[in-house]
Every structure is written in C-alpha cells, then in structure tokens.
Amino acid sequence: MSININKAQLFIFIICIIITNLVAFYTGMHLGEFFKIMEIESRSLLPPSANLKISIPFPNLSSFKNLSSVSEKETLSKKNKFYIQVGAFKDINNAKKMAEKLEKNGFSTEIKAGKLNFLLVVGEGDEKEEKKVVDRLKKEGIKF
C-alpha cells in the first residue's frame, strides 16, 4: 500500500506543519506570559510574610521571566491603585469645577464621562492609605 502525492500536495502539507508549529510556539509564549502575570498578581494579594511561605506550582515559570512586556512593578502598581467616588454629575462642567477644587487641595482626580459623569479621587497604596484619603476627604468637608 503506497500513498501517491504530488509535489504541490507535499509543499502545502509542509507549509501547514510550519504554520501549526508557529502558532503553537507563539501560543506557548503568551501562556508563559499569562502565568507570570498570574503569579505576580497572586503574590501582590498576599501579605509579605505569606509570600515567603508559599510557592506557586509553576515550576518552569523562570524560563519565561524575560518574555513579558509588562514589568512586575507596573502590574503591582496597577493592583494597588484605588478609586473613591466623590460625585456623580449630569453636567460635566460641574464635575470639572469640583475636580479643580479637589486638585487644589492636593487630591488626584479622574472623571469617567457618560450619561452621568463620575468624579473619582485616585490614589495608590494599600487599605491603610485608602483610609487616610477617605479621612482627609471627610476633614475637607467633601461628602460622598
């Protein structure tokens, strides 16, 4: 029993194998990047003392360390950002006026525009830092 294939069929078969291997290679790279980000984010949720006691079961993760386009610091800083809604305005100009007032008092603000324009105070840090910002807002007389 023999299989008869011509040169065109053989060429198409080889091209298909090459494409399949390239897809598998790049998918593997992205999975490695995904696992690295998962490890970084999961470690950022734990207290520092727990990080020393826990090992995450991705034994070959070290081989993917240089693949990620997202640095460890960037991922952690995104995770530690918090938002406190201090207002919702129909008129965006009112939101901008309130944002200017807050920024003069040293707060960082952001407006999420839409049917209702949400005014947010933005900060970075843990729960203690967020509580400090909330207390400071209350001292300034900002109701939210």
Image (tube, rainbow, N blue to C red):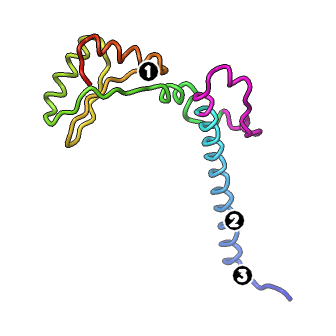
Dot placed on the residue nearer the N-terminal end, 3 or 1: 3
**Residue found at x 41% / y 26%:** 82
Q: Which residues are magenta?
A: 42-65
Residue located at (64% from left, 35% from top): 39
Marks 3 and 1, Cα distance to the nearest angstrom? Answer: 65 Å
Q: Decide which of tag 3 and tag 2 comes sooner along the chain.
A: 3
Q: Nearer the viewer, residue 64 or 39?
A: 39
Locate residue 2, reporting x and y percent.
84, 86
**Residue at the disc numbered 2:** 17
Q: Of the residues tagged 3 and 1, which is closer to the observer? A: 1
Name, please, the residue furthest toward the right: 1
The residue at which mark 3 appears reads as: 6
Could you tell me if the residues under marks 2 and 1 are in contact, i.e. CB atoms within 8 Å?
Answer: no
Which of the two residues, 92 or 16, is positioned nearer the viewer here? 92
Tell me the SS state at disc 1. Answer: strand
- Reading the image, the residue beneath label 1 is 124
Residue at the image point whose x is 20% and y is 16% from the top: 101
Quick check: 39 left or right of 102? right
Residue 21, horizontal then vertical, whole percent: 69, 58
* Quadrant of the image containing the N terminus: bottom right
Q: Is residue 98 magenta?
A: no
SS at mark 2? helix
Percent position of residue 112, x then y: 27, 35
The reply, left or right, for residue 28 in relation to residue 84 is: right
Q: Amino acid at mark 1?
A: Glu
Disc 3 from disc 2: Cα separation: 17 Å
Query: In the structure shown, which secondary structural element does the residue marked by tag 3 occupy?
Result: loop
Asked if the residue under mark 2 is in contact with the one under mark 3, i.e. CB atoms within 8 Å, the reply is no
The kind of residue on which mark 2 rests is Ile
Q: Residues within 10 Å of mark 3 (few under 14, many from 20)?
A: few
Name the amino acid type tagged 3. Asn
Quarter in which the C terminus is drawn:
top left
